Image (cartoon, coloured by chain):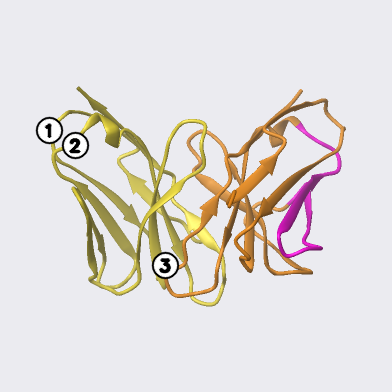
Amino acid sequence: TQLLEQSPQFLSIQEGENLTVYCNSSSVFSSLQWYRQEPGEGPVLLVTVVTGGEVKKLKRLTFQFGDARKDSSLHITAAQPGDTGLYLCAGETSGTYKYIFGTGTRLKVLA
Amino acid sequence: NAGVTQTPKFRVLKTGQSMTLLCAQDMNHEYMYWYRQDPGMGLRLIHYSVGEGTTAKGEVPDGYNVSRLKKQNFLLGLESAAPSQTSVYFCASTHMGAEETQYFGPGTRLLVL
């Protein structure tokens, strides 16, 4: 069974602080996605990374895919209360057409 | 363009009752998925479909059945509900491609007593 471990599980920080969320697996993925989920809603895609070592930026969010395509990180610079939510990573193994989701990181940014 | 819709939004069942959750997408996506989300467990794949008339098992398929008779619809059935099936159910759809975006519905909250 493929597993995606996310850390930390919970994070409560002050507005303006930086943070990093990690997504790790022993499996190799052809692509890895990051989602944010608000309470009572479905997850919304933030980014997809497909190449080992790839770095993508989305405003204050920086996403990196590990060289071996087994892990990924999400770094938020100068966090804002609007960043509060559940962050999920999801990996897809080539040819399987299905995604394995991580356990999630619940982030709370205090004003 | 409504995206992905799910009905019902909320349902309470008694143990042993049956029900069907409906997922509909208007984006002409080939792939559709049913997930369940439980506290501290992330999302777990129940069943998925890569095209009309085809379905496959995911991580946690026991106790569920699915059908994809039309490309735009994906039905999830519970034949005999159990309290362990209390969860929030999400449907998602996506195109084929290297950087697919999964679009999720708003979820169905199911409580089995």
- The residue beneath circle 3 is A27
Indicate which disc, 1 or 3, sits on the residue closer to the N terminus. 1
Q: Going 80% across and 47% down the picture, which residue do you hit?
A: B77
Q: Tag 3: residue type?
A: Ser
Q: Tag 1: residue type?
A: Gly
Within the magenta stretch, is there residue B8?
no
Which SS class for mark 1?
A: loop
Q: Residues within 10 Å of mark 1 (few under 14, many from 20)?
A: some
Nearest to viewer (mark 2 / mark 3):
2
x, y percent for residue A48: 36, 63
Quarter of the figure with residue B12: top right
- Res. B11 mark: none
- Check the residue under mark 2 and report the chain it is in: A
Magenta stretch in the rendered image: B62-82
Q: Colour of chain A?
A: yellow
Label 1 – label 3 distance at C-alpha: 34 Å
Q: Colour of chain B?
A: orange
- The residue beneath circle 2 is A79
x, y percent for residue B79: 86, 43
Left or right, A31 with respect to B6, comes to: left
Marks 2,1: beta carbons within 8 A? yes
Q: Is residue A29 visible?
A: no
